[in-house]
Image: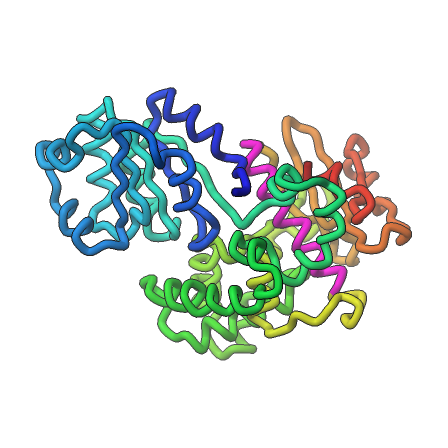
Amino acid sequence: MIRRRIEEPILKALSGKKAVTIMGARQVGKSTLIESLFSGGENVLFLNGDEADIRALLKDATSTRLRAIFGKATTVVIDEAQKIEDIGNVLKLIADQMKEIRLVATGSSAFELATDINESLSGRKREFKLFPLSFKELVDDTNLLEQSRLIHHRLLYGTYPEVVTSPGEERIVLKELMDSYLYKDVLNIKGIAKQDKLESLLRALAFQIGSQVSYSEIANLIRIDSKTVEKYIDILEKCYIIFRLPSFARNLRNELKFDKKVYFWDMGIRNAIIGNFAPLELRNQQEVGHMWENWLMAERMKKLEYDRSFAGKYFWRTTTKKEIDLIEEEDGEITAYEFKWNPSDAASCPKAFLAAYPQAKYKTVSPSNVDEFLL
């Protein structure tokens, strides 16, 4: 089994008497992770919010009833917690009145779960996010050489655990993920009205990775209003399907200040949405460059999240179309990254950026040095 990077931090948080929440999309390995950490342990109680009797058991629960339910358990793990009515109050009762209990809750939708938990467990919890397998997790499980050779494959099929462990069946697994999670679960969220509009929106976003996203242009394209587009994108982001990257602007008048780019957390999902798993050799270089940018961006976001980094993440572009793929700002230090699929492609920092931010570092990331960026 591939070891996940958040395993040790979770155990450390629990030893520090913190409740733990684990958020992430379906099928990224949350259930497998908690089974690995707690299965076989003494006095561990697993409760699954997918099961109707568990939901009924915890509905309107009092602390007295919870003690009876838990019995001798000292660790309580609630999987798919967002399915349980008023889960925030349940978790608050446990954290407030049953301090001897080590509490772990997982959820597949930050949209449905985060607000309740954040309000009820303020200051008493440690939140972790789990994503499709990261480059570092895969390297640690095998080796750098093997994973470097598989980058082409990852750009096509992504790194959902079942995809990685089902060689030759990647398309079948991705279709199952799309049918069971991407549309079915997301459509059950309040605010998503029509599947055809959601599909059209996702296709539009999938074709625009690496480019600035205009809500009004997408609205005109799929024939819904721009506020609905923004609401749908917000929901998709909270369901860990996509993420947004804001623009960086500090010193120059012509820097883009309010634009955003949208990326997919998993390239397999992106390619499944547009129905294109053609080898990179059969695609035009611009598309391959955008796919490389999306994969690198998602992998870097995973690394920074798992490292518990406070770095701000942005892209930079001016009205004259000078641009940098990624800007990270941490402790007053700015580092600019340009992504190049072809290591021989020349890349130099835009003069306007250097003039505005003379202390900034500038680095190019290609397949030849990806380990320096992601490990």
Q: For the C terminus, which image quadrant? A: top right
Vertical relation: 330 (above or below) 190: above
The secondary structure that dominates the magenta segment is helix
Q: Quadrant of residue 72?
A: top left
Q: Is residue 11 shown left or right of residue 216? A: left
Residue 40 in percent (x, y) is at 34, 33
- Residue under the image location 66 percent in, 45 percent down: 248
Residue 64 in percent (x, y) is at 9, 32
Residue 97 in percent (x, y) is at 17, 26
Vertical relation: 294 (above or below) 279: above
- The span picked out in magenta is 288-308
Q: Could you tell me how many numbered marks the image carries?
A: 0
- Residue under the image location 74 percent in, 39 percent down: 371
Residue 29 in percent (x, y) is at 46, 48
Residue 268 is one of the magenta-drawn residues: no
Q: Is residue 156 shown left or right of residue 61? A: right
